[in-house]
Image: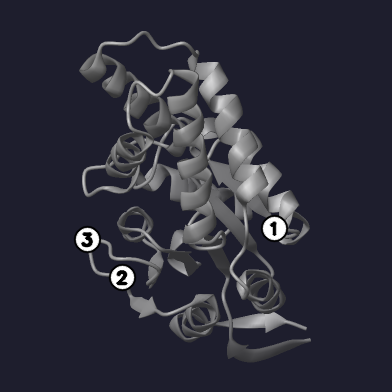
């Protein structure tokens, strides 16, 4: 039997800053910056590494993934302060994974938002610039992996947000037309990527961000975002 109502054909959540708290993400990176400074005998201020990382990943011109930004910031500081990098890119990736899983904390409404969206539309997923192993590790750690139909990572497909191809891959894997998908994220990359892919975009206002395109709605939290997404896409759902 089918009933008319407000629902989503498909909803895609960003991971860091959307499902995972900004604070826990920042804490993971601060701890990692401190560890890298310690490994290099504190030849650079860990705070500077943390600031560089944020500019490279979250800044207006940021195009790097989280692990790429961590490595790039380290090599930039090595050049600036004249020290030899003592770790490999793989070493940094391993530490990056370890710290992010250890510190990951979901927003209090994250699990309920995913369950609610899943109940209404049947298809939910995560799209992230995080490495595949990290994304799956964190999603399992916070207890939402089993609710997801797709997890699409930049590492797996070789493109980063806001490249629309990453968003289109997610829609294809869910078997849903892009126009019937809503992306919920906290970054300009989520909004721009969604709009370029022909999807609706809802920005969850976690922190100040300079937008390149306007979202369809700005929400204060995930609960409001999911409710608004239901309004944006009217469809039929099977009960």
The residue that label 1 is drawn on is: 148
Residue at image location 38% in from the left, 57% down from the top:
190
Q: From this view, report whether residue 4 is shown above or below residue 75.
A: below
Q: Kindly report which numbered mark, 1 or 3, lies closer to the viewer in this rendering.
A: 3
Looking at the rendered image, the disc whose residue lies closer to the viewer, 3 or 2, is 3
Q: Where the N terminus falls, by quadrant?
A: bottom right
| First in sequence: mark 1 vs mark 3 | 1
Position of residue 84 relative to residue 105, above or below, is above
Look at the numbered discs 1 and 3 and tell me whether their residues touch, using CB distance below 8 Å.
no
Q: Is residue 129 at all visible to an observer of this figure?
A: no
Query: Where is mark 3, residue-wise?
Result: 210
Sequence-first disc among 2 and 1: 1
Please, what secondary structure does the residue beneath circle 2 have?
loop
User: Of 114 and 197, which appears nearest the observer?
Assistant: 114
Task: Give the camera-side residue of 78 and 197.
Answer: 78
Secondary structure beneath dot 1 equals: loop
Instruction: Give residue 223's position: percent from left, percent from top.
Output: 55, 81
| Relative image position of residue 136 (x, y in whole percent) | 68, 44
Q: Residue visible at 67% across and 78% down?
A: 116
Confirm whether residue 67 shows in the render: yes
Mark 2 highlights which residue? 215
Tell me if 30 is positioned left or right of 214 in this view.
right
Give how far across and how far down residue 183 sits, in percent.
Answer: 46, 64
Q: CA distance from mark 2 to mark 1?
A: 24 Å
Say few, some or many: other residues with alpha carbon within 10 Å of mark 1 (under 14 / 14 to 19 / 20 or more): some
Residues at discs 3 and 2 in contact (Cβ within 8 Å): no
The CA distance from mark 1 to mark 3 is: 29 Å
Residue at x 44% of width, y 35% of height: 33
Is 175 positioned to the left or the right of 212 in the image?
right
Dividing the picture into quadrants, the one containing residue 10 is bottom right
Dot 3 or dot 2: first in sequence order is 3
């Amino acid at each position: 039997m089918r009933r008319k109502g407000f629902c989503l054909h498909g909803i895609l959540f960003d991971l860091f800053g959307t499902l995972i708290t900004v604070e826990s993400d920042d804490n993971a990176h601060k701890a990692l910056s401190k560890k890298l400074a310690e490994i290099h005998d504190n030849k650079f201020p860990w705070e500077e590494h943390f600031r560089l990382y944020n500019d490279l990943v979250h800044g207006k011109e940021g195009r790097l993934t989280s692990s790429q930004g961590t490595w790039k910031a380290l090599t930039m500081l090595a050049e600036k302060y004249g020290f030899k990098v003592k770790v490999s890119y793989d070493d940094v990736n391993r530490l990056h994974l370890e710290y992010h899983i250890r510190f990951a904390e979901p927003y209090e409404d994250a699990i309920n938002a995913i369950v609610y969206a899943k109940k209404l539309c049947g298809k939910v997923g995560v799209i992230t610039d995080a490495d595949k192993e990290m994304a799956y590790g964190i999603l399992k750690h916070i207890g939402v992996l089993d609710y997801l139909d797709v997890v699409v990572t930049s590492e797996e497909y070789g493109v980063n947000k806001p490249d629309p191809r990453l968003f289109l891959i997610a829609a294809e894997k869910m078997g849903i037309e892009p126009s019937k998908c809503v992306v919920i994220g906290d970054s300009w990359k989520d909004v721009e990527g969604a709009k370029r892919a022909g999807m609706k975009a809802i920005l969850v206002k976690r922190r100040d961000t300079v937008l390149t395109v306007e979202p369809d709605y700005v929400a204060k939290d995930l609960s409001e975002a999911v409710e608004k997404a239901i309004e944006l896409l009217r469809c039929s759902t099977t009960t």
